[in-house]
Image: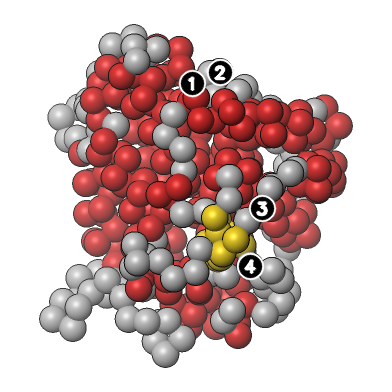
């Protein structure tokens, strides 16, 4: 584990490879019984009075979860060097195990870490963004517990007022925000795969449940990125930026090359026809998903612009290029939206 992670990630954050995620609601249903007790625990009335109650419920649910046996993946010929660098930089360990159990454990652990920081130091962004962040966790857990039903919404306890961060606090927000973002990325990939599978089967209600989950997870991704960037400029410069650049990080390291993000992009492209089919009966879900993608990529671009400015070169730039980071992110933003069918309210600019 990287030296700067000591005291931030006390044990490796375990995730399965996105390649190992199931792709059908039938596979999810076989593991749903393992998730259901924890889902009831963290969405019950006692868990929703305040952050302390929700944190206690998360701890109870994780302690009761049977994660099953897991083993490290080890050397993986399908893994890119840039993914390996990202995993190492954020304390992530890839494991083999029952994927739904591993994902559920990662979801419980990552949201508890975020809530713990919010309880101690508050947040500095809009309350709606906070509700989307926690609501995405709720949606994932409830859908895994019952993949045939669109997940219900539950009250989200508010964080406290923003307080100054202790030394190392900015790096913790950055790391934990990315951990929960990785969970949401895997969950969104899984829900899009199930959307495709249900659409192919002509199952409108099952497809709508998967699509509704994808919408909430994409909105939650915006919240996760906002949380990761919820730090002061000087703290970013001293605690975070050095971990993203040589000699600590390899050249051109970026989360856009994380295998989980790459899997999500592939699934976005593959799900185009399924979205088109579902839009025939539920057009609002496609519109909401397009809005959520727009917001998530705008949040990424906004974090970048806040800390490195509109003109600073992208980490993806080569020695012969000086393209600004925000311009690179905007290009990716437009490409992702273009992977989806236009919505009924499309105004002609692709959004």
Number of the front mark, 1 or 3: 3
What residue is rendered at 29% in x and 62% in y?
Answer: 326
Task: Measure how far apart labels 2 and 3 are at the Cα level.
Answer: 29 Å
Q: Which residue is mark 2?
A: 149
> To which quarter of the image does residue 123 belong?
bottom right
Task: Measure how far apart labels 2 and 1 are at the Cα level.
Answer: 5 Å
Q: Secondary structure at mark 3?
A: loop
User: Percent x, y for residue 57?
Assistant: 82, 41
Task: Measure how far apart labels 1 and 4 are at the Cα level.
Answer: 32 Å
Residue density around tag 1, few if under 14, some if 14–19, many if 20 or more, within 10 Å: many
Q: Check the image and report above or below for 85 versus 49.
A: below
Q: Which residue is mark 4?
A: 12
Residue density around tag 3, few if under 14, some if 14–19, many if 20 or more, within 10 Å: few
Q: Check the image and report above or below for 285 versus 125.
A: above
- The quadrant the N terminus occupies is bottom right
Task: Measure how far apart labels 1 and 3 are at the Cα level.
Answer: 30 Å
Mark 2 and mark 1 residues within 8 Å of each other at the beta carbon: yes
Q: Which residue is mark 3?
A: 69
Mark 4 and mark 2 residues within 8 Å of each other at the beta carbon: no
User: Percent x, y for residue 160?
Assistant: 76, 51
Number of the front mark, 3 or 4: 3
- The quadrant the C terminus occupies is top left
Does label 2 or label 1 sit earlier along the sequence?
2
Q: Which residue is mark 1?
A: 209
What residue is rendered at 60% in x and 23% in y?
Answer: 146
Q: Viewed as shown, does residue 55 lie left or right of 3?
A: right
Q: Secondary structure at mark 1?
A: helix
Does label 4 or label 2 sit earlier along the sequence?
4
Q: Secondary structure at mark 2?
A: loop
């Amino acid at each position: 584990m990287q030296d700067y992670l000591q005291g931030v990630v006390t044990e490796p954050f375990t995730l399965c490879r996105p390649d190992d995620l199931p792709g059908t609601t039938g596979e999810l249903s076989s593991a749903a019984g393992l998730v259901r007790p924890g889902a009831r625990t963290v969405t019950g009335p006692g868990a929703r009075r305040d952050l302390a109650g929700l944190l206690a419920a998360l701890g109870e649910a994780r302690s009761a979860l049977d994660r099953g046996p897991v083993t490290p993946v080890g050397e993986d010929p399908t893994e890119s060097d840039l993914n390996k660098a990202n995993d190492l930089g954020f304390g992530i360990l890839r494991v083999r195990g029952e994927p739904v159990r591993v994902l559920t454990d990662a979801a419980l652990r990552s949201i508890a870490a975020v809530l713990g920081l919010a309880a101690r130091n508050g947040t500095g962004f809009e309350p709606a963004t906070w509700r989307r962040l926690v609501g995405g966790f709720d949606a994932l857990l409830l859908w895994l517990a019952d993949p045939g039903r669109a997940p219900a919404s539950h009250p989200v306890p508010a964080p406290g007022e923003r307080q100054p961060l202790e030394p190392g606090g900015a790096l913790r927000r950055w790391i934990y925000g990315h951990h929960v973002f990785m969970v949401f990325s895997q969950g969104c990939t899984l829900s899009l795969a199930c959307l495709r599978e249900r659409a192919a089967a002509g199952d409108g209600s099952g497809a709508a449940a998967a699509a509704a989950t994808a919408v909430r997870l994409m909105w939650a991704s915006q919240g996760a990125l906002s949380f990761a960037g919820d730090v002061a400029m000087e703290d970013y410069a001293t605690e975070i930026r050095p971990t993203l650049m040589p000699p600590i990080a390899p050249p051109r390291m970026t989360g856009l090359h994380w295998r989980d993000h790459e899997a999500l992009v592939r699934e976005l492209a593959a799900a185009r026809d399924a979205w088109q089919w579902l839009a025939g009966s539920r057009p609002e879900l496609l519109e909401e998903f397009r809005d959520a993608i727009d917001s998530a990529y705008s949040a990424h671009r906004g974090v970048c612009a806040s800390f490195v400015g509109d003109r600073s070169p992208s980490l993806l730039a080569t020695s012969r290029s000086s393209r600004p980071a925000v311009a690179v992110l905007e290009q990716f933003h437009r490409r992702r939206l273009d992977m989806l069918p236009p919505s009924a309210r499309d105004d002609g600019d692709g959004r």
